[in-house]
Amino acid sequence: MEAVKLACATCGQMNRVPRDRLSAAPKCGSCGEPLDDGRVHELDRLSHDKAVRGDDLPLLVDYWAPWCGPCRAMAPEFAKAAKALAPEVRLARLNTEDHPDIAGRARIQGIPALVLYHRGREVARLAGARPAAQIADFVRQNLRP
């Protein structure tokens, strides 16, 4: 039985989850929070770095800020895309105002910015607010073998 590694967005703990159990909304073994439940998770410095570097599943991160109108307008669409892509892809958000160092490291020059990571590497990025269907298409197109 193949297992995948997933970082908990709440506590940062790395978890091994059997691939065939991903659709059963697995929970963190440390804090009990859901790992892959089709919701968008807020990241902090620790959870961002662990998820980007350690997750076996693709991770799409929305770099945003509370003062950004297009970022706020895209949030419901990003949530719809999270439901559509689960459990094969996880979606998360990072507030660039609270974590400017991470935004700088990720070379974020404008927001909203979507960056797709897989197994510790950046796969693709997309700038600007998008509807859920375009977000899902962007992910699927960039994860083709």
Image (cartoon, grey):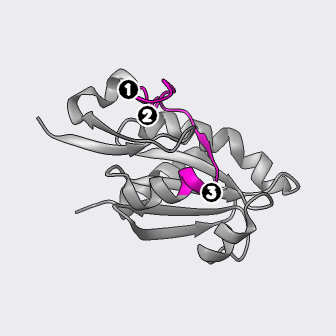
Q: Is mark 2 on a helix, strand or loop?
A: loop
Q: Where residue 134 sits: x, y (%)?
A: 54, 53
Q: Earlier in the sequence, mark 1 or mark 3?
A: 1
Residue extending furthest toward the left: 1
Indicate the position of residue 15 as horizontal and vertical percent values.
35, 39
Q: Which residue is drawn at 71% across and 77% down?
A: 109
Give the amino acid type for the residue marked by disc 1 in the picture: Pro
The reply to whether residue 121 is visible in this rendering is: yes
Q: Which disc, if any, is residue 45?
A: 3
**Camera-side residue of 65 and 83:** 65
Give me the C-alpha separation between circle 1 and circle 3. Answer: 23 Å
Q: How crowded is mark 1: few (under 14 residues within 10 Å), some or many (20 or more)?
A: some
Residue 36 colored magenta? yes
What residue did someone put label 2 on? 36
> Looking at the image, which residue sits at the far front?
30
Q: Main secondary structure of the magenta part?
A: loop
Give the number of the mark in front: 1 or 3.
Answer: 3
Q: Is residue 104 above or below residue 133?
A: below
Q: Distance between the residues labelled 3 and 2?
A: 19 Å
Sequence-earlier tag: 3 or 2: 2
Q: Classify residue 90 as left or right of residue 107.
A: left
Element at badge 1? loop
